[in-house]
Amino acid sequence: MKLYHAPGSCSQAICIVLQETGLNAEIVTVDARRHLLPDRTSFYEVSDLGYVPLLQLEDGTFLREGTVIAQYLADKSPESQLAPAHGSIERYRLLEWLNFLSTEIHKGFIPLLYAVAAGKWVDTAGPKLQSRFGWIDSQLAGKRFLMGDNFTIADAYLFALTGWGTASWMKSVYNANIDLSAYLHVREWYELVRERPAVQQVLQEDGLLAL
Ligand SMILES: N[C@@H](CCC(=O)N[C@@H](CS)C(=O)NCC(=O)O)C(=O)O
């Protein structure tokens, strides 16, 4: 397999999932802002949509959309327990989280990441995103991870997204700050996830460990 990835982007979640499963994939680093491949040719030659993550499967076909790629990898490695079994109510709980993260958090960040173009929209988007993190905080009370005791692909996804609002390297590029000071559960969860060997490995490979 081949994963098209941009360090610090949402595809970080897929790198974490790969590390957690131990599955092998060649990582192709994409400049997601300029849509360039490592040899400076256009990423649009590979993907019409021009965004990461993108997974090329062994048969040469492509799988896109982070939430789907993460499930594909988790299902390939059931022993990693990164996703509950298909058909179980817990699987639907996972889908609830993935959909929430994709639509409420991931896309909730977009106006903040493109604040200059978004203009006054940021005044609405910022507090809304902040309140969503407040809700996540309430859901994490009494739990180690989003789904309970087990780390799942939803935690990997939220970890990548939370970094956009908190990581120091991000603050130097964007003004997408999320104030987590009142959200003790989110902060404890973030540290718990950050300490995982798989996460440390990805942060190190992407040059983000010390930042
Ligand atoms: N719907 C896609 C969105 C992926 C996405 O937003 N990727 C960003 C990085 S986090 C990207 O590559 N942006 C470049 C672009 O859209 O041109 C998914 O959930 O996988």
Image: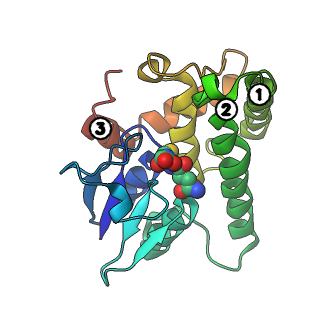
In primary-sequence order, the first of circles 1 and 3 is: 1
Of labels 2 and 3, earlier in sequence is: 2
Compared across the picture, whether 158 is left or right of 10 comes to: right
Say left or right for 57 vs 168: left
Left or right relative to 180: residue 163: left
The one of 162 and 41 positioned closer to us in this rendering:
41
- Give the residue at x 34% y 56%: 43
Q: Between residues 122 and 44, which one lies in front from this camera angle?
A: 44
Q: Residue furthest left?
A: 39
Amino acid type for the residue under numbered disc 3: Asp
Q: Are marks 1 and 3 in contact (CB under 8 Å)?
A: no
- Mark 3 — residue? 206
C-alpha span from label 2 to label 3: 25 Å
Which of these two is toward me, 34 or 153?
Answer: 34
Depth check: give the residue in front, 40 or 136.
Answer: 40
> Which numbered marker is on residue 111?
2
Q: Quadrant of the N terminus?
A: bottom left
Q: What is the x, y in percent for residue 175?
A: 57, 19
Label 3: which secondary element: loop
Q: Residue at x 33, y 29 (%)?
A: 208
State the count of labels: 3
Q: Position of residue 124 (x, y in %)?
A: 81, 26
Could you tell me if the residues under marks 1 and 2 are in contact, i.e. CB atoms within 8 Å?
yes
| Residue denoted by label 1 | 121
The scheme the figure's colours follow is rainbow
Q: Tell me the kind of residue under disc 1.
A: Trp
Q: Quadrant of residue 73?
A: bottom left
The amino acid pointed to by label 2 is Pro
Q: Residue drawn 29% across and 42% down?
A: 201
In the drawing, does residue 23 fall left or right of residue 112? left
